[in-house]
Amino acid sequence: MAELIRGRYRLRTAASQADVAQAQALRGLVFRGAGLSDADAFDLSCRLILIEELAGGAVVATFRICVLRTGADAGLSYAAQHYDLGPLSGFPYPMVELGRFCLHPNWHDPDILRLAWGAITRCTDREGAGMLFGCVSFRGADAAAYQAAFNALRDDHLAPE
């Protein structure tokens, strides 16, 4: 993925083991707690994306993208570990799975999200993707607190039959 720059930030694909470690460390901070890493086998098969502050190089966001040729490859995705994606096996177009998206808790600049969504749009357009999908994490176990989000997902964002 080509480098993108917006305001004070640069988005780029991880190019080294040190880059991968930075992405895993930020994911660990966000998903598991300070000082913990978040790594799995999908880091090897996906494009890891870093968004960095230009001035100091701090990684302020990260996510990964997995491009699947068709729905027949849906079983190779991260989401397939947790959900039955078998009904997508006949989907005839490329699919893009977005995963492990996180922002550093101390960074809240909208340009960070603008860069991320710009890169995601560029990727889905370039790949001719007919579907963008992934898993979502919610803090805690109180489903009632997220009912509005669940309703929006159910009403407007279900996969094809």
Image (tube, helix red, strand yellow):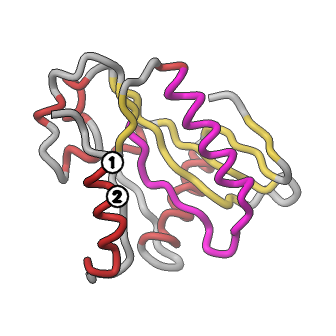
Q: Which residue is painted at 52% across and 77% down in the image?
A: 35
Is residue 90 highlighted in magenta?
no
Residue 48 pos. (x, y %):
53, 42
Gap between marks 1 and 2 measured at Cα:
6 Å
Give the labeled residue for mark 2: 152
Identify the amino acid type marked 1. Answer: Asp
Q: Point out the residue furthest to the right here.
A: 55
Position of 7 relative to 140 (above/below): above
Is 81 drawn above or below residue 110 in the view shown?
above
Observer able to see residue 15: no
| Label 1–label 2 contact, CB within 8 A | yes
x and y percentages locating residue 161 in the rendered image: 15, 34
Quadrant of residue 160 in the image?
Answer: top left
The residue drawn where x is 28% and y is 39% is 77
Residue type at the position of mark 2: Ala
| Residue 76 vertical placement versus 40 (above, below) | above
User: Going 35% across and 41% down the picture, which residue do you hit?
Assistant: 133
What element does badge 1 sit on? helix
Q: Which residue is mark 1?
A: 156
